[in-house]
Amino acid sequence: MDITLSTNGGGYREGYEEFKKNATGKGLAWLEAIREQGISRFSELGFPTAANEDWRFTNVAPIARTPFSLIRNGREKLSPRALKPYEFPGLETIDLVFVDGAYSEELSKTGTLPGGVRVENLARAFESDEGLVKEHLSAYADFTDEAFTALNAAFMEDGGFVYVPSGVRLEKPVHILFVTTSRTRPTIESPRNLIVVEDNASAEVVEQYVSLDESVYFSNVVTELVAGENSSVGHYLIERESKKAFNISTLRAEQKRSSNIRSHSVLLGGALVRNNIHPVLGGEGCDSLINGLYMSTGRQHIDNYMKVEHKSPHCDSRQFYNGVLDGRSRGVFHGRIIVHKDAQKTDAKQTNRNLLLSDNAQIDTKPQLEIYADDVKCTHGATIGQMDENAIFYLRSRGIPNETARDVILSAFTSGTIESMHVREIREYCENLLDDWFAQRRLAEKD
Amino acid sequence: MLEIKNLHVKVGDQEILKGLDLTINTGEVHSIMGPNGSGKSTLAQVLAGRESYEVTEGEILFEGKDLLELAPEERAGEGIFLAFQYPVEIPGVANTYLLREALNSIRKYRGEEPLKHVEFGKLAKEKMDKMGMPDSLLRRSVNEGFSGGEKKRNEIFQMQVLEPRLAILDETDSGLDIDALKIVSDGVNALRSPERSFLVITHYQRLLNYIVPDFVHVLVGGRIVKSGGKELAIELEDRGYGWVEEESRQAVNN
C-alpha cells in the first residue's frame, strides 16, 4: 500500500509513522535517529513561505498543497532500451539506476571497480558500508533551517553511494540516473546521494533526473559530497524532468585543504525547480568552480540558490550561471557568498547573465555578499538582456541566414557554461540537449 | 550596378532621407560626404537591409533587382558588403567561425560548394597577413576587446575574404590613427577592380587622400545637394559644409 504525504490532517508526520515501519536500513539506530530528527524539524519548520528571505521569489505552495503518494511497491519494470536517450554516447560509465525512487539492480551496471572503490545504492551501503555511511551521512547537509533537507532526511531511503579511497583516480565517471515513469497520481521521491572522495583521489559523478512521461511528481534531492585533501571532483547535475514535476535539489559540498571541485548544473525541465548549491571551502587553498545553465519556457520556474562559504584562507571560488528564459517562465538567481573571519586572501567571483527571449519572461537576480574577513577579493555581476538585434543584423549582413544567426547568438550565450566540463562526452550530450531546446523553440515559434 | 531613385526613409517619426538619387556604375568609387545628421549612415544601413529603417518612397535597384525585397543575408549573397561604423562585439562567437559561416552561406546562396576547412584556413591566413593582423585574432570572439582600430581593420579583413561586388564603407576612417588609416586604405585599394564598386561614406576629406574616389557627393538634409569629382572633397575640407548648405537652401527657395 502506498503512503500518502499531505499537509492536511496528521500532516507528513502521519505518513512518516507508516513509512518508518518498513523503511530501508530499518533497525540501524543512527539512521533512525537522523530520520526522526528530520521529521521533527520538518514538522516544526513546515514548507517555507515568501516571508522567508531565501524563498522570496519562489512560491512552493503548489508543492505544499499537493498530496503525494510515497510508492512502496508495484514499480514499473523498464527495459534497458528505455534508458538509451539518457546515455552519453561513446562514454563508459559506472551506472546506478533508480526507477521511481527505487534501485534497479537489472538496469544498473557497476562492473569491476578499482581496489577499495565502492559504487552502490545507498540502501545497500547502509549495511555493507555502514561505517563510512554513518560517518558522513547527514554530517554536512544541515537542516536546522532547511525544511526540504529535513524532509529528505526523514524520508531518504536510497540513492547513489560513491566512495573513492585515498590516492585512487576513478577513471570512469559514475552516472546516477533517476527515472520517473508515468504516474497516475502525484508521487514523491527523496533521493539521497553520498559521494566521498578521499585525499589525493579523483572522480566525476553525474546525477541525472529524467521523466518518461509528463507526470506530476516531486523529487526532493539531497547530495552530500566530500572532497578530501588535494582531491579533484567533478559533479554534474542534469535535470530534464517533466514540465509538471517539482524538483528541489541540494548539493552540499565539503572541501578539505587544496581540493578542487567543479559543479555543473544544467536545468531544463520541471515546473518548479530549486537548485541549491552549497560548497564549504573548509581547508586552505581550495578551488571551487560553480557553473550552471538554466533554460526555461512555458510557465516553468527555475530558482538557483548559491551559498558559497569560504572558511579558510587562500581559497578561490568562481560562479558562472547563465539563464535563458522564454515564454512566461521565471528564473531566480540568488548568489550568496559568505567569507568567514579566518578566510583571508579569499578570491570569490560571481557572474550571472540572463537572456530574456520573450516579453513575458522574468528573472530575479540577487547577489548577497557577507564578508567578515578584511583582506579578500569578492566580485559579482549580473546582467539581464534580450537577444542582441545588432549582433544578429551584423551576422545577417555577412550572409548568415536569420535562423542560423539567432542560433549562433543563443549558443554563444549558453556554450560558456558547458565548455568547462572536463568529460567531452558529457559536454557533447549537454550540447545536444541545448540544440534540441533551440529546435523545439523554433518549432514553437512557427506554430 | 546600383540605382537609388527618390529614396525616402523614416526612422520612427522622423524622415531622414528625403528623396535621394544616386547611381553607381560597375568599377566606380563614389564618396558621400556630409555633416553629422545628414543621413549618411542611414543610407548605409538601408542598403544593408536594416529593418528598423522604413522606406516610405522610392526604389533601390542592384544589378536590376529590387534590393528592398531582399533580406540582409540575401543582399550579402548578391554581393553587398557593409563595413560598419560601429562593428558589433559578439562574445562567444569566434571570428573564424563567423567568417567561414558567412563565406559558405554566400557560396550556398550562389549555388557554389562550401569551402573546405583547409582552403578556408589558407584564404583567411593570406588576407590576415595582408591586413597585418595576428593569426590569434581569428580564434578570438568577434570584435570583443578589440581596439577601435582593430575593429575597423577586422571589417576590411572580412571584406577581403568575402570579396563583395559593392562595398559600402561607413565612416571606416573615424577614430583611426594615420598608420591604421593607411593599412585600412591599402586593404580597400587592393580590392579595387573594374568589377567592383565602392561607396565610401566619410565625414572627413582625409580618407580620400588614400582612397581616391571617382565621384564625390554631398549629402545635406537627406538629399544629395552637390556632386563632383575628387576636387570637391578638397573644397569641402577648405570651406566646410556651410556654403553647400547655403547653396542648397537658395536652390530650394528659387
Image (cartoon, coloured by chain):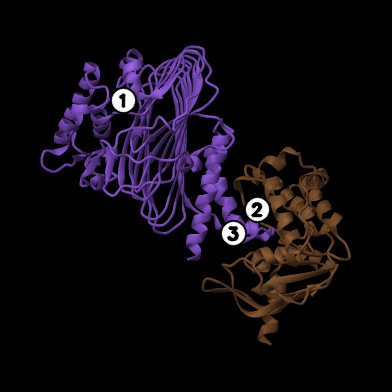
Location of the N terminus of chain B by quadrant is bottom right
Given the current orientation, which residue lies at the most extreme left position? Answer: A9
Q: Which mark is residue A403?
A: 3
Mark 2 or 1, closer to the camera: 1
What is the C-alpha distance between the residues marked 2 and 1? 50 Å
In the image, residue B108 lies at what x, y percent? Answer: 73, 60
- Discs 3, 2: same chain: no
Packing grade of label 2 (10 A; few <14, some 14-19, many >=20) is many
Labels 3 and 1: the sequence-earlier one: 1
Query: Which residue is at the front of the view, A349 or A47?
Result: A47
Q: Amino acid at mark 2?
A: Pro
Kindly report the distance in space between the C-alpha atoms of the residues bearing marks 3 and 2: 21 Å
Q: Which residue is mark 1?
A: A141
Q: Nearer the viewer, residue A227 or B94?
A: A227
Measure the C-alpha gap from mark 3 to mark 1: 45 Å
Picture quadrant of residue B114: bottom right
Residue A149 higher or lower than A411, as above or below: above
The residue that disc 2 covers is B87
For the point 55% across and 45% down, the residue is A432
